[in-house]
Amino acid sequence: MKKNVFLAASLALILLISGVGFASSDAGDLMAGDPVPEFEVLDLEGETVTNDIFADKDVTMINIWGTFCGPCINEMPELGELALTAPEGSQVIGLVMDISADDEASIETAQEIVEVTGADYPHLIIDEILYEYIYNVPGVPTTIFVDSEGNQLCEPIVGAMPGEEYRAQIEELLDEPG
């Protein structure tokens, strides 16, 4: 447990230093077409979640965020609104990158942030598999868009954006043939 918390904290510090809060398309090793690895994690409510979360939607927006990240938290109210009014065939989920499933205090912190910001959509707790997947993300928030099989549909977005810009991206992806 201590090793996972240390790794998450180290990653959080690296991401913070690397320039959190700017919109960019440079997301390290995350590339369009790449699949999200098979995972089985808990969400903030203690429910088990797998890649099946993608199956019923044509586009899933995955917002990678941290409890330490001001720009992440600042965009969450708009993401909460987007989740409530998401275009048909799409959904929003969060991936909390700096907490551990066996650290109750960190889960409570994330739950409080979600409640205060109104970001009422599923938030997954990172595990080692997802940690390796996002390891080279240069900052948070980073947002990726995947299809019903978990394949990335476009280059990730690094940095916060207004909810309407995320909505436009989702609508564009829904309109693409494929």
Image (cartoon, helix red, strand yellow):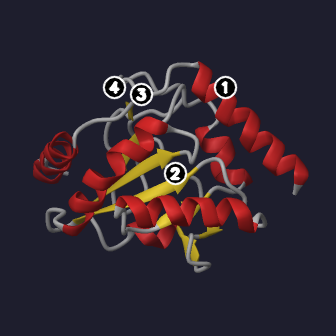
Which badge, 2 or 1, is on the more N-terminal residue?
Answer: 1
**Label 3: how many residues lie within 10 Å, few (<14), some (14-19) or many (20+)?**
many
Which quadrant would the N terminus be assigned to in this image?
bottom right
Q: Name the residue carrying label 3.
A: 21
Dot 1 and dot 4 residues touching (CB under 8 Å): no
The kind of residue tagged 4 is Ala
Q: Quadrant of residue 121?
A: bottom left
Residue shown at 10%/50% (left/top)? 175
The kind of residue tagged 3 is Gly
Which badge, 1 or 4, is on the more N-terminal residue?
Answer: 1
Q: Is residue 39 visible?
A: no
Question: Could you say where residue 156 lies in the image, as x and y percent from the top left?
Answer: 38, 35
How far, Cα to Cα, is label 3 from label 2?
24 Å
How far, Cα to Cα, is label 1 from label 4?
17 Å
What number is the disc on residue 36? 2
The kind of residue tagged 1 is Ile
Dot 1 and dot 3 residues touching (CB under 8 Å): no
Q: Name the residue carrying label 1.
A: 14
- Residue 18 position (above or below residue 29): above
Which badge, 1 or 3, is on the more N-terminal residue?
Answer: 1
Quick one: 156 or 112, which is closer to the camera?
112
Q: How many marks?
A: 4
Which badge, 4 or 2, is on the more N-terminal residue?
Answer: 4
How far, Cα to Cα, is label 4 from label 2?
22 Å
Dot 4 and dot 3 residues touching (CB under 8 Å): no
Question: Could you say where residue 40 lies in the image, as x and y percent from the top left?
Answer: 64, 69
Residue shown at 41%/36% (left/top)? 71
Q: Is residue 53 left or right of residue 104?
A: left
Q: Name the residue carrying label 4.
A: 23
